[in-house]
Amino acid sequence: MALPELTSLLPRAADPDARAAIPRRFSERAFTWAFGLIQWPWLLRSLSGGPDAARSDLLALLELPDDVLPALGSWKADAFFLRLVAEHVRSEQPQSVVELGAGTTSLVAGRALQLWGGGSLVSFDQHAPFVAETRDWLARLGIPADLRVAPLGPPPPGWPGAWYQLANVPERIDLLLVDGPPWTVHPFARGAAETLFDRIPVGGVVMLDDAARPGERVVAARWKRHWPGFRFRHVAGGTKGALVGMRVA
């Protein structure tokens, strides 16, 4: 059973927290859409979720049926990033995984934890209906995960756009998956994920999806400056690329 595509590019207008956070100033809105013109080749390429063979290999690795995944690509992670997550969980067996931006990554991370190591997944997303649907989807598949609604609100100092209003985040995060908010909030919005880096122990990892996009490249450059105790590397592949940072000190 595939997950219905309930997540739009922008937070829903009916969400009062989203209205308070997006949009703010005209200059910031103009910057976001101007940046979209710059990165349209990457956005166009990301419409593909990867070759069918990569999708089939991923499902075989996770011991899941062929029809369990929705169409990949667009705002969803591609097969390359999902495989990267699954293989990391299999090799490193993190006990605490936190995800920003629920969906197919929730399925893959939750299933990988179920198969290898038995750690826990806590996932945050801004869309309450989407969170409920994803929670039901995983429950029907027998995959454990703790999915929570985190409305978008004011970002932390130093970052533009809006950010998840997080509560009760695990004190220790062995693997942090960053796949939200969408770029239409602001091209640099995902940079605020660094507010959770202090919770990542030595040996822990952060993974940023869509790392080939110009906005995420700016985020990566800032992270490298702000966090010398992490070793960051760009992983080429798929339609979007990934940034992987391991804490070494």
Image (cartoon, rainbow, N blue to C red):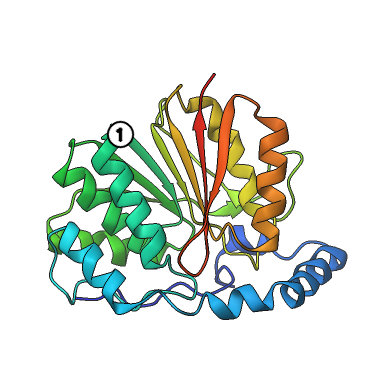
- Provide the secondary structure element on which disc 1 rests: loop
- The residue lying furthest to the top in this view is 249
- Give percent across and percent down for residue 238: 45, 66
- Give percent across and percent down for residue 24: 78, 61
- Residue 47 as seen in the image, left or right of residue 216: left
- Residue 65 as seen in the image, left or right of residue 131: left
- Residue 67 as seen in the image, left or right of residue 163: left
- Give percent across and percent down for residue 197: 55, 31
Q: Which residue is mark 1?
A: 94
Q: Tag 1: Cα neighbours inside 10 Å, few (<14), some, or many (≥20)?
A: many
Name the residue: 58% across, 57% down.
211
Residue 27 quadrant? bottom right
* Residue nearest the observer in this picture, 234 or 49: 234
Q: Kindly identify the amino acid type of the residue bearing the numbered disc 1.
A: Pro
102 w.r.t. 169: above or below = below
Name the residue: 43% across, 69% down.
76
142 w.r.t. 166: above or below = below
Would residue 187 be seen by someone viewing this image from the given angle?
Answer: no
* Residue nearest the observer in this picture, 81 or 196: 81
Name the residue: 70% across, 31% down.
226
- Give percent across and percent down for residue 187: 69, 61
Which quarter shows the N terminus?
A: bottom left
Would residue 9 be seen by someone viewing this image from the given angle?
Answer: yes
Name the residue: 57% across, 68% down.
11
Which quarter shows the C terminus?
A: top right
